[in-house]
Each structure stands twice: as structure tokens, then as C-alpha cells.
Image (spheres, coloured by chain):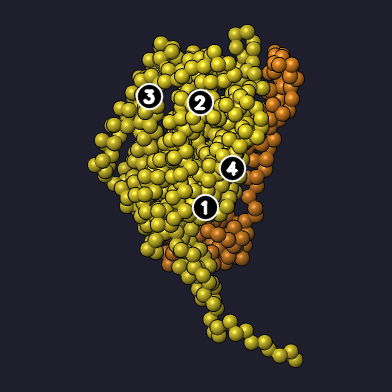
């Protein structure tokens, strides 16, 4: 008979306690508390600050539409761009907004595939941010074409009056497909995630109008497990589709520049560099939005300091990739031995737009490095301020790439200097108005935290956990 | 009066409803379901549900999107109106790839969602369960096993007894 080997680590009579992770929902909130807390924001009275915020945002958005009306009725000459800088604030704003959207998809799709359960309490609002950012982004390329009424012929694959089709060798057309697919799939993904929560809103509704409106969009959801089975598979597949999509969108946006032959644009580092920058800027915007929201609506138990800490780490990681890309661009400009390329980069840092370049470096390279310190990552005021700098820096990055490359290219006789007009400035400011208007409406009418998903990551939801009703013996 | 649709049994925790689901499955019912506020991990296996076939819709959608994209570009730029740009070939799968790639994702996403809704029989704006007041808690914090009268094994007394033994504290009949 073999001798029994005593395991000195084993505790007799009880299984060793597994290391518990920090809970995602604080204070051991019940399942019902989660739906009560999130739904009451929508069901309760309108907060006092909401109406002033909404009216200001809507007026600012109205100003943007007035500016666009002026642009369309007069011509693109009302903007400051002209030869040699044929693209300026319009495309800067487009890339800026589309980049912001990327954080929402990263949170909803990539973090889902990586099983980062903390994403559940921020994904709904981040995806809404994506949609509204894409809406703001889409306006600029649409109106910058000049004759907007002909846009369907430039953009959609339909022949013009001469039977001529769009030219698919152009990255600009790839971009049309990338951005419109991105907007559509983001909307679908967001809506699929909303279905169970709309059913919650329907079942809680007290008025007929609410019951009908939420019930209509909930599509008759009953929480059936046979439905959940297909639903979860569809959600997983959509996450799997959105991941290559989000990576491709900013890659294709970067092709708008990289496929051309302008010094400063024609570089192979652009796709990964643009994607990292997009995620960096998007997380900046998520933090800018979430930090006030969690306080305003009392969601501290759902959007915890740990969430802010983790997002700070993502900002640090992507900010460092961006910093590396800035350095590598300079290195290749020198190492590549092309005098035009080298001049473009010297001109960026020390030419007439030096102020834009160094604003970008301060905001994007220096600022996020503060996130190496946990005390800063968990200090909400500090994170909020840094997130604003990230937003500013990433706008400057696109301005630097676009305008400093265009304003001085091969022919010194055609060099110039771009300055924005008031129409440029007010249109850009107005796009923030549109973004805020849409976000305020979202907060007022839809559950801004994914109720069913947050429930699913609590211990009460786990049938093998004592809080989920498991009886003895289980871990 | 309307005829009964089925019987619903309420449970408080995911572990309880999972144990009940195992019992109902073992008893050989076919027209029954478990309703939960969120997807409960392991419930598919407890109910004996096979892997969802949604992926087939996704795959077919993706294939259609990709081939559709390639054919569209080939037809438009190389057949219907040939445009020569910079001496490049009239068609090449390389320049057609980004657009076809996006169309793959677009079509696959639509197919996934419509496939999921089709398999679930949704949208459905009317359902006997949605008229039951108690059942409204299914989207809040309660868990239900629902057995339809349409099931051949259904009997008013026996089925109720099975659900009681499974530990349900509230069982009621739902009208059609």
C-alpha cells in the first residue's frame, strides 16, 4: 500500500479560500438595485441642470447648422482653406471626431473579446459617444465637397450623368465605405445591446406612451433563455466583426494621407499610429464624459475609481505608442534620406506652425506620462484635467499632420500659410454643441448603463456562487 | 374565457432556477423555457440547448458582402465604364480589397442581427407572458421556468407538482 502523502498546505475540512477579485459593483448591491438605480435616472424628474445644458448645447448646434447653411449657399471660400492647404480644419475635425469614436468600439468589442468584465458599466455610454462622434465626423467631409447636393454621386456607388462610376482606386472612396460601415455597425451593435434594457424600461413603465415606446423598440423581449442563447452568440459575433472593423476604419482614414505623395503623409507607420491615436483620444473623451456623469447621477458604485484607474492605464499605453510614432516619424525622415521628407518634419517642429506642434507634444507625449503614478490615476480631478489635454492634443495632432504637410510641399513658389476664418471656428465649436445635445438626449431617455450586462458580472448572477444561490461545497 | 398558455414558476436565484431547469429537462419536456434578467452562465447546458446556429447567417452574410464588393468594383471600373488611371490595371483585388472588406463586415453584421431575430421569432409585439404582471419582474431580479400547455407531457397537476418540488414558491397559470 502506498504511503499517504500529507499535503501540508491543505486545510482539513474546508477548501482553501479562492482569491476574490475586487468587486465590479461596490457595496454588494442587489440585482434589483442595479435596474432601480439606472432606470430611475430616466424615470425620475429632469435634473435642474439638464435644461440649461440642453438649451445651450442645442443653440451651439444650431449655430453650426447656420454656418453650414452659409457655407453651402456661398461656397467653400467662406473657410480659410485655399491652395496650397486645400484641407484644413474640415478634415482635422473629421479625423478628430472619428478618432474619438474608436474608444467606444474598443470598450464594447475588443474588451468584450478579452473578457474585461469592467467594461459593462461604461460600454453603453461609450458606444453612444461613438455614434454621436461619428455623426459629428460625418458632417465635415460631406460639406467640404462644396456642391453638397452632388454628394450622392461622389459618395455612393452610382453612375453620374455621363454614366461614369466612382473610382475605386482612390482611398477617399475606401474611406466613405469604412466610415459609413463603421457608423452603421456601431448603431446595430449598440441597439442589440439595448434590447434587454429596453425590455426592463418597458416592464417598469407606468405611462402608456412609455410602455409603447420602450416596448416597440424592445421587440417583444421576454428574457427567454432560448433567445439569450442566440442573442449572446450574435453579440459575440458582432464584437468579433467590430474588432477588425474599428482597426480598419482608422487605418483607412490614414490611407487618405499615406497613399498620397505629400511629404509628411507618405509614411507606412500611419495605420497603426492612427489607430493608437484614435484609441488614445477616445479614452480621453470617455474620461471627460464619465467623471462628471458618475457624480451627477450618483453612479459611484457602478463606475468606480477602479474604472477610472484602468482607463488611465489605457491612455498611458496608447499615449506612449503615439509618442513612439512621433519619434519614429522623425527618425525615418532622417534615415530615409529624402530631403523633402526631412524638410517637412523640420518644418513641423520649427516652421511657422511650431506652436501647433509643441502644443501637440505637450498634450500627447508629456501629459499622459503622469498616469504612471497611481495617485494621479485615482485622483478624479487630475484625470479629468489630463483627459481634456488629451482631447486638445489629439485635435492638434490632426491639424499638424494635415496643415503643416500641405502648406509647404515640393514647390517653394506655392508655399502659403493657412489661417481659419470665423466660419471655420464656429462650425467646429458647433460640432461640440451637436455632440452634447445628442448625449444629453441619450442620458435623458435611455438607460446609460447596460443593466443586464452589469447584473451578469455580479456574484449574485453566478449560479456557482453562494450569493447566486449555490448551496455548499461549491467555490 | 381564453385558454391557458402555460404555467410559470418563479425562483429567486440563478442556482435555484438552474436546478429546476435540469429537473424539467430530465422530465422530457419540449415546449418550455427559462426566463432570466441576464444570460445565466451554464443554462444552455442545463436546458439541453445546442450551440446557436447564428454563426451560419454571419458567414453567409460575410461571403455575400465580400463577393458583392469585388463584383461591384470589377463591374463599375473594369466593365461598364473603363477608366484608366496612371496606367494601372482596370481591376485588381488589391485596390478592391478595402471596400470589399468593409462590405464583408457590413453584410455579416446585418445577417447576424436579422439571423438572431429570425431564430428568436422576434420582433414580436404581443406575447401572453408580457400581459402577466408578476412576470414583468423577469427583467428586474426574478427567474422563471415557463412550461407551455402545448407540450405533450403537460398536465395541470403533475407539472405543478414538478415545479413545486424544484423549489418554486410562486406558481401560476398564464392565459393565452
Q: Colour of chain B?
A: orange
Q: Which residue is under mark 3?
A: A425
Q: Colour of chain A?
A: yellow
> Vertically, is A353 above or below A389?
above
Separation (CA) of disc 1 from disc 2? 57 Å
> Pointers 1 and 4 in contact (CB under 8 A)?
no
Q: Which residue is under mark 1?
A: A224
**Label whose residue precedes the other's in the sequence (3 or 1):** 1
Q: Nearer the viewer, mark 2 or mark 4?
A: 2
Q: Nearer the viewer, residue A235 or B128?
A: A235
Q: Quadrant of residue B11?
A: bottom left
Could you tell me if residue A31 is visible in this image?
no
Label 3: element kind = helix
Could you tell me if residue A317 is visible in this image?
yes
> Vertically, is A320 above or below A339?
below
Label 2: element kind = helix
Q: Which residue is under mark 4?
A: A243
Q: Nearer the viewer, mark 3 or mark 4?
A: 3
**Label whose residue precedes the other's in the sequence (3 or 4):** 4
Say few, some or many: other residues with alpha carbon within 10 Å of mark 3 (under 14 / 14 to 19 / 20 or more).
some
Q: Chain of mark 2?
A: A
Q: Nearer the viewer, mark 1 or mark 4?
A: 4
Q: Position of residue A164 (x, y in %)?
A: 64, 12
Amino acid at each position: 500500500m502506498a504511503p499517504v502523502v500529507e499535503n501540508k498546505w491543505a486545510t482539513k475540512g474546508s477548501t482553501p479560500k479562492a482569491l476574490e477579485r475586487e468587486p465590479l459593483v461596490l457595496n454588494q448591491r442587489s440585482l434589483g438595485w442595479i435596474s432601480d438605480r439606472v432606470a430611475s435616472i430616466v424615470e425620475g424628474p429632469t435634473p435642474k441642470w439638464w435644461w440649461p445644458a440642453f438649451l445651450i448645447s442645442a443653440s451651439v448646434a444650431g449655430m453650426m447648422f447656420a454656418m453650414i447653411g452659409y457655407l453651402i449657399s456661398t461656397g467653400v471660400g467662406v473657410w480659410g482653406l485655399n491652395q496650397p492647404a486645400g484641407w484644413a480644419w474640415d478634415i482635422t475635425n473629421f479625423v478628430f471626431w472619428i478618432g474619438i469614436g474608436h474608444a467606444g468600439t474598443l470598450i464594447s468589442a475588443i474588451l468584450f473579446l478579452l473578457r474585461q468584465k469592467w467594461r459593462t458599466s461604461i460600454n453603453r455610454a461609450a458606444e453612444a459617444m461613438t455614434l454621436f462622434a461619428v455623426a459629428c465626423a460625418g458632417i465635415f467631409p460631406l460639406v467640404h465637397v462644396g456642391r453638397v447636393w452632388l454628394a450622392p454621386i461622389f459618395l455612393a456607388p452610382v453612375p453620374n450623368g455621363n454614366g461614369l462610376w466612382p473610382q475605386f482606386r482612390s482611398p477617399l472612396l475606401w474611406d466613405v465605405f469604412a466610415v459609413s460601415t463603421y457608423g452603421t455597425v456601431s448603431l446595430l451593435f449598440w441597439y442589440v445591446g439595448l434590447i434587454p434594457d429596453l425590455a426592463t424600461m418597458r416592464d417598469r413603465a407606468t405611462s402608456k406612451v412609455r410602455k409603447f415606446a420602450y416596448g416597440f423598440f424592445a421587440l417583444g423581449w421576454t428574457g427567454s433563455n432560448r433567445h439569450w442563447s442566440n442573442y449572446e452568440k450574435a453579440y459575440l459575433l458582432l464584437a468579433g466583426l467590430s474588432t477588425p472593423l474599428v482597426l480598419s476604419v482608422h487605418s483607412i482614414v490614414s490611407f487618405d494621407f499615406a497613399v498620397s505623395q505629400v511629404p509628411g503623409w507618405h509614411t507606412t507607420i500611419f495605420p497603426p499610429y492612427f489607430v493608437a491615436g484614435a484609441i488614445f483620444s477616445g479614452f480621453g473623451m470617455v474620461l471627460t464624459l464619465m467623471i462628471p456623469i458618475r457624480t451627477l447621477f450618483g453612479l459611484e458604485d457602478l463606475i468606480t475609481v477602479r474604472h477610472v484607474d484602468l482607463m488611465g492605464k489605457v491612455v498611458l499605453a496608447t499615449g506612449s505608442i503615439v509618442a513612439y510614432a512621433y519619434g519614429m516619424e522623425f527618425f525615418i525622415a532622417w534615415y530615409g534620406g529624402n530631403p523633402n521628407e526631412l524638410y517637412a518634419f523640420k518644418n513641423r517642429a520649427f516652421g511657422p506652425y511650431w506652436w501647433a506642434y509643441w502644443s501637440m507634444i505637450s498634450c500627447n507625449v508629456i501629459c499622459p506620462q503622469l498616469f504612471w503614478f497611481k495617485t494621479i490615476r485615482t485622483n478624479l480631478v487630475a484625470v479629468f484635467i489630463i483627459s481634456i489635454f488629451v482631447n486638445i492634443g489629439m485635435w492638434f495632432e490632426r491639424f499638424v499632420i494635415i496643415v503643416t504637410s500641405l502648406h509647404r510641399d515640393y514647390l517653394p513658389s506655392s508655399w502659403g500659410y493657412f489661417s481659419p476664418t470665423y466660419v471655420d471656428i464656429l462650425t467646429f465649436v458647433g460640432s461640440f454643441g451637436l455632440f452634447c445635445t445628442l448625449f444629453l438626449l441619450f442620458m435623458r431617455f435611455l438607460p446609460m448603463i447596460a443593466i443586464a450586462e452589469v447584473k451578469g458580472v455580479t456574484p449574485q448572477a453566478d449560479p456557482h456562487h453562494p450569493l447566486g444561490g449555490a448551496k455548499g461545497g461549491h467555490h | 374565457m381564453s385558454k391557458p398558455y402555460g404555467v410559470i414558476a418563479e425562483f429567486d436565484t440563478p442556482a435555484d432556477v438552474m436546478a429546476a431547469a435540469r429537473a424539467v429537462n430530465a422530465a422530457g419536456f419540449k415546449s418550455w423555457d427559462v426566463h432570466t434578467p441576464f444570460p445565466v452562465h451554464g443554462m444552455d447546458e442545463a436546458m439541453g440547448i445546442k450551440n446557436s446556429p447564428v454563426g451560419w447567417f454571419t458567414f453567409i452574410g460575410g461571403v455575400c458582402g465580400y463577393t458583392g464588393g469585388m463584383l461591384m468594383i470589377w463591374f463599375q471600373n473594369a466593365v461598364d465604364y473603363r477608366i484608366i488611371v496612371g496606367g494601372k490595371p482596370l481591376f485588381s483585388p488589391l485596390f478592391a480589397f478595402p471596400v470589399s472588406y468593409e462590405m464583408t463586415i457590413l453584410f455579416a453584421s446585418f445577417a447576424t442581427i436579422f439571423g438572431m431575430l429570425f431564430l428568436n421569432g422576434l420582433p414580436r409585439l404581443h406575447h401572453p407572458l408580457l400581459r402577466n404582471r408578476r412576470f414583468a419582474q423577469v427583467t428586474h431580479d426574478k427567474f422563471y421556468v415557463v412550461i407551455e400547455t402545448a407540450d405533450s407531457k403537460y398536465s395541470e397537476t403533475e407539472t405543478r407538482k414538478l415545479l413545486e418540488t424544484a423549489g418554486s414558491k410562486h406558481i401560476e397559470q398564464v392565459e393565452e
